[in-house]
Image (cartoon, rainbow, N blue to C red):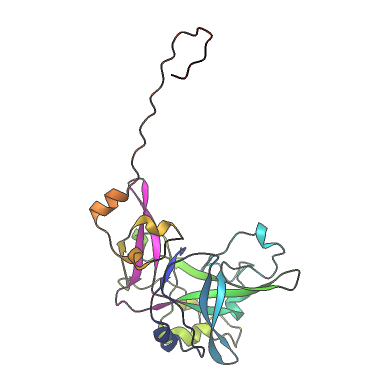
Amino acid sequence: MCGRFVITSAPAALRQLFGYVEQPNFPPRYNVAPTQPIPVVLIENGARHFRLMRWGLLPTWVKDPRGFTLLINARSETVLEKPAFKNAVRRRRGLIPADGYYEWKTEGGRKQPFFIHRADGAPLGFAALFETWAGPNGEELDTVAIVTAAAGEDLAALHDRVPVTISERDFERWLDVSGNEVDAILPLMTAPRIGEFVWHPVSTRVNRVANDDEQLVLPIGAEEMEAEAPKPKKAARKATAGPDDGQGSLF
């Protein structure tokens, strides 16, 4: 799955890669989390555009979002059938610019975070599906989910699911929804090829959404991992009760 990601490339570099007409200026983000606004590239009127959407898709048929489970990911195997995604996969596909993402692996009884990124260090585009939710009072909210696939042999060492990444040569094919057909994009919803991504352990500071700095993506060694490991709790000493003489005691 994908529950946190990173956007560190310069805005101009991302604009050149994804080809949208806007010229947004935004700071690097090292700990992007669900419910936050995130950049999404889409096609409108034949041109690519940059939009901000809330990470966590709300289908149009949801009446009260407070009682609806946050959909941050969409499984590629079932997007054509799931009511939440079956319309979006045909008509509302987008790309989320990123430079990597985090995954957690349970090791020795604790969850160790890892930073995962392309081996060549290049930015990437997550496959995304989006919907505009309309509230009862006329309010509108653009929402988005990241498409995931079963992990390949290498990344499966960390987690059984990975975000689907679309290569630059396939951007147009993924974004083009003019024909309302999905046959052409089905082969794109797969895991990255083996060796395309690499990873390293990072500090558990990434667990806190409030932490958002460049130190989060730096690799840590075995000593630092050990230092961050939760210490075993000492058993509380059981007080020995004395004879009860009917008097209260502070000691």
238 or 82: nearer the eye?
238
Q: Quadrant of the C terminus?
A: top left
* Residue at 38% from the left image edge and 57% from the top image edge: 205
Can residue 246 be seen here?
yes
For residue 9, side relative to residue 176 (left or right): left
Q: Which residues are magenta?
A: 97-125
31 or 78: nearer the eye?
31
Can residue 153 be seen here?
no
Magenta residue check for 123: yes
Quarter of the figure with residue 239: top left
* Residue at 52% from the left image edge and 11% from the top image edge: 247
Magenta residue check for 226: no
244 or 107: nearer the eye?
244
Quarter of the figure with residue 220: bottom left
Q: Vertically, is 65 above or below 43?
A: above
* Residue at 53% from the left image edge and 68% from the top image edge: 36
For residue 224, side relative to residue 176 (left or right): left
Picture coordinates of residue 143, whole percent (x, y): 59, 72
Picture coordinates of residue 65, whole percent (x, y): 66, 62
Query: Furthest residue to the right?
Result: 137
229 or 189: nearer the eye?
229
Q: How many marks?
A: 0
Picture coordinates of residue 119, whole percent (x, y): 30, 74
Picture coordinates of residue 41, whole percent (x, y): 51, 82
Q: Vertically, is 211 above or below 243?
A: below
Dominant SS type (magenta)? strand
Quarter of the figure with residue 153: bottom left
